[in-house]
Amino acid sequence: MLIIVPIKQVPDTNDVRIDPETGTLIREGVPSIVNPEDRHAVEMALVLKDQAGGGKVVVVSMGPPQAEIALREMLAMGADEAILLSDRAFAGADTLATACALAHAVRQLGQYDLIICGRQAIDGDTAQVGPQLAEFLQIPQATYAQDLRLEGGKIRVERAVEGEVQVLELPLPALVTCLKEANKPRIPTLKGCIGAFREKPFQVWNASRIKVPLEQIGLKGSPTQVRRTFTPPPRGQGIVLTGDPQQAVQTLVQTLREKGIM
Amino acid sequence: MAISIDKNLCVGCGACLKVCPYDAIDLIDRKAILNDSCVHCGACVDSCKFKAILSQAGEGPRKDLSEYAGVAVFAETRGQGLAKVATELLGCGRALADTRKVGLTAFLLGHRIQGLAKDLIAHGADRVVVVDDPRLAPFRTAPFARALTSVIQQQKPEIVLIGASGIGRDLAPRVANRLKTGLTADCTGLAIEEGSGLLLQTRPAFGGNVMATIVCPHHRPQMSTVRPGVMKPLPRDDHRQGTITEAKVTIKETDLRTVVREVVRLAGKKVDLSEATVIVSGGRGVGGAKGFEGIRDLAEALGGQVGASRAAVESGWIEHDHQVGQTGKSVSPRLYIACGISGAIQHLAGIAGADFVVAVNRDAQAPIMKAADVAIVGDLHQVVPLLAAEIRRARKENAA
Ligand SMILES: Cc1cc2nc3c(=O)[nH]c(=O)nc-3n(C[C@H](O)[C@H](O)[C@H](O)COP(=O)(O)OP(=O)(O)OC[C@H]3O[C@@H](n4cnc5c(N)ncnc54)[C@H](O)[C@@H]3O)c2cc1C
């Protein structure tokens, strides 16, 4: 069984701060991490591989050379092979151009059974690359998976959305995006870490290696463009009530009545 | 790349039909013809033994953007009715259509849903295009993607809005890809740029730390998913006039490979904060699961729902369905009461749509206090029970 897991290296948005003077992002000193939900995707793949009685889990990432460390970390977790898609030509990609590059890389890997992505990346929160990749490859998809099982050559997926769970059955190959509720990612062992750097195959592929037309990737292949970024404007200041709580509460209730809210 | 078929060379063998991943080739009068689904991927070129399929390198088919006009929304349904986000999209779509001086169309897809068309008109649509097909219930990605793509190709709107719900976020990326156009996720602001007439699509990025405005200048339609709970629906007006038409789409056998075995409604703890009119939320300041009893009691006194900050959810005091903010729900109640919540930017991102915000916090300097219409500086363990009692007293007085 060949399972492919596309992963992304992201800035830890918990640590992103805004420069109060200029209103711009301070990225300096912000650590890069593996997108949290992508770890769950790798875990899901590793469990499934065992269930299937063997196979291979390949992690793929499109990113700058530094993204190597994110891929090595996933090798340490237990993935078998890693491929880094790195080329200046990929830069500036929106979700469509990213999915396009990933699709071409997947085609280079031959016959695969399953692609598992994290639900979304914490820097963009778009949740678009998974479904767009499935569309390029013309395979069925199940997003928001909280559970995934192999059943007689097909997969059974529990898709959790808005107060309901859909139980889906998909033929293979298929693409699944997974929720963090699905599992608890394993911690790399020391042996895993050594293997990740010494034994396991790690390759860097450029645009020509994946045979992708240059006009379909990077900035050129991106229909959307960022016009501007800014910090959200604050809401205006209202009434501040200090002192005796009973008094404050009465004033509040009166205000609510006057405004017709109560 | 641009693909074309030379009719004189084509013998009608049909070999190309089998290799086309998009079902984009039809055999008509023993000739292969490209249909609307063709994305010029080139997969068919080598399949033709007669060299009838030509591929031209270069810029690809430049779409004539002026062909596209009008604003369209995807009218998501829920159970027997419309999803709330459908009416929100109409509210915002109406404003965009009026600015562009064009019509507003709703695409209504499903089975036995025609009855909802008049609701869409009452909420602002000029036109409703209905696709009724038993294979469109319950929701499945592939048949919906096929149907929605076809309707967009037939109608050619310049703007398409889809709710950023579990269904919309599953469906929209596939449709945008099939149309090879841009898609902006989870928009919280939409406007028309003066001069260019482009759709300005604003959304939070980097965990809500910054907002980004995205445009899609050279491709049509311009597509966005829109965060539920942010846009305001128009009041229902049954006197509004509009037309209802049926569209024909061809759903393929291959679209039906996914089987929905069952749909389990999570009964009991059904919280839908995005539709609540009053929300009382607790944060880290509440201090524990037990502390949420006071919050619940206040919510009950007001006939509202209980919300929470991420800190409270991550401490395990309350389930994730209750989380308000960037990674929780966006809410738009008439009244939002934040108790023991500092008002981090990611939390505030979720309450931008609230009409009236009350904050209870010990710290007068907390950011939430500057965002509140009424800020009470004090200990929530004192203030919350007093407030619940005062509200119950006022209610009684009203009733008497
Ligand atoms: C990518 C990302 C996404 C996020 N998404 C969300 C999200 O969706 N929703 C969300 O809420 N957060 C989100 N966060 C987290 C957010 O940044 C804050 O950490 C979180 O909102 C803080 O929760 P809090 O206000 O309850 O806790 P704190 O910031 O710890 O604030 C507690 C407040 O309670 C007050 N207090 C304490 N005791 C009392 C008392 N007895 N009486 C009155 N006041 C008291 C304190 O003065 C303080 O202001 C996100 C963060 C990131 C990085």
Image: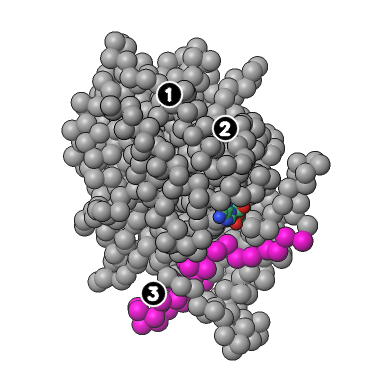
Going by the image, does A88 lie left or right of B246?
Answer: right
Residue B8 vs residue B32, the one in the foreground: B32
Q: Chain of mark 1?
A: A
Q: Position of residue B130 (x, y in %)?
A: 27, 27
Going by the image, does B367 lie left or right of B91?
Answer: right
Q: Position of residue B208 (x, y in %)?
A: 61, 46
Q: Chain of mark 3?
A: A
- Whether labels 2 and 1 belong to a single chain: the reply is no
Q: Which residue is mark 2?
A: B373
Q: Quadrant of the N terminus of chain B?
A: top right
Q: Which mark is residue A260?
A: 1
Q: Position of residue B333 (x, y in %)?
A: 43, 35
The residue drawn where x is 30% and y is 50% is B270
A48 to A161, vertically: above or below: below
Badge 3: residue crowd in 10 Å (few <14, some 14–19, many ≥20): many
Residue B14 visible in this rendered orientation of the protein: no
Q: Position of residue A221 (x, y in %)?
A: 61, 43
The residue drawn where x is 55% and y is 64% is A36
